[in-house]
Image (cartoon, rainbow, N blue to C red):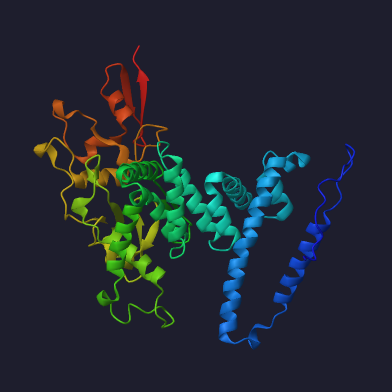
Amino acid sequence: MSAIPAEDDAVWRAPGVDAEASPRVTALLRRLDDVLGDLQELAMGGLVDPDVERLLMATTVASSRLAAVECRSAAEADRRRLGEVTGAQHTHQWWSGLSRLTRAEASRMVRLGLALQRDVHAPVAAALADGEVRVDQARVIAESVDALPARVDAETRGRAEAAMLGFASKHDARDLRQIGKRILDVVAPEVGESHEEAVLEAEEARAVAGVELTLSDDGNGRCHGRFTVPSHIGAMFKRHLLALANPARHTEAELRDESGDLKPLRRRLGEAFIEYVERYPVAATPQTAGVNATIVVTMTLEQLLAEHATALLDDGSRMSAGQARRIACEAGIIPAVLGSDSQPLDLGRAARLFTKAQRVSLGLRDGGCTAKGCQTSASGCHAHHDDPWSRLGLTDLANGRLLCPRHHRLAHSSRYAMTVHADNKVSFARRT
């Protein structure tokens, strides 16, 4: 006979009278607390290896069984709307306030508890209560079955859930998620292929819609960033970086850091990323307004040759002349050495369009659109002839300026007059 007092559900209470604490729940929680206390006081150092393994596995199973009770309790709290006592809109908000769980964590457990209350997921609930599956496995199984197409009948859903419970004995939650996408191939091959295609297409659409990249310079010589791309792009990018970081491509000295220790993989991948960018072929870079996506490094000939000097990048930041000399021959870098005649910048009437070298020089001189108040960068501008080429205007720097597409249209519009000011800025006024 159990030493735990039995519940008496037949006790009648007048309306408005609070229920007394259940002696059965009190006794169970006391026993649980005592067992956990005894386990906490267990001296690990005195245990033999098999006991440590047994203890680890037993507590892992016990945590699953406790999670099953936690899910049931959360679902019951949601059914009773206990959060309304404090004005909480949702059960997980009320629970997170009591327990100091994050709202996201509490919400996940409430959703799992509610899912496991449904008849279709009764086998998963039983497996979690018996400690046969882990919380994340139970969540993935329930979500995978719920994600099956509406045309899948209850019997097939039951077979899918049973199959995934079988796979759970050998696969973790991550593997189960991939298996769940193809579970119909196992239990209903006739609909499995079309379902997997629909799932993959939906995933791909979400991945494309969620693509983003952010970069920010911290002002201390470092740039930080993060990105989100489709999985296959991430796999391709990682494969490229791993190939560049392959130890077989590097000397022993290159594989060690400043203290002589071997560089961790994350640093070698970071260095591979730098090499990936610096050595990207300039011929393959896309063109914007006639110029490849390049960085322009400006320095005098004296700075280029000096041991201690600095160089100016076209975005206003600086680098050492040594760094500039190193990367000057790399893809995507243009050394603009002032005083050099290595590239002809004034072509006169030899060409109608400004050359790449002239566009770079205009960008350095004008910095962007020369219309007063316009913030368009050089890469977004057109090269404009002050004296139109059609009227024998020369294609040289003295006759050129950068204008954004809008102001370039105004410059050629008979409705507007353009005035060039002493600072090389221009303004427009509607003709009367």
Question: Number of labelled discs?
Answer: 0
Q: Name the residue at the front extreme.
A: 1
User: Which residue lies most toward the top here?
Assistant: 432
Q: Is residue 124 left or right of residue 285?
A: right
**Nearer to the camera, 199 or 364:** 199
Q: Nearer the viewer, residue 27 or 108?
A: 27
User: Residue 405 appears at what percent x and percent y?
Assistant: 30, 30
Residue at horizontal 13%, vertical 29%? 392
For image coordinates 34% across by 15% down, the residue present is 431
Please indicate whether residue 198 sits to the left or right of residue 1 in the image.
left
Can residue 93 be seen by looking at this rendering?
no
The foreground one among 322 and 1 is 1
Q: Residue 297, relative to residue 380: is it above or below?
A: below
Q: Position of residue 189 (x, y in %)?
A: 31, 47
The residue lying at 15 percent from left, 49 percent from top is 344
Point out residue 294 in the picture as x, y percentages from the top left corner: 27, 51
**Which corner quadrant of the image does residue 371 belong to?**
top left
Image-based side of 329 in relation to 45, left or right: left
* Res 288 visible: yes
Q: Quadrant of the N terminus?
A: bottom right
Q: Quadrant of the C terminus?
A: top left
In the rendered image, residue 275, in percent from the top left (x then y), is placed at 29, 64
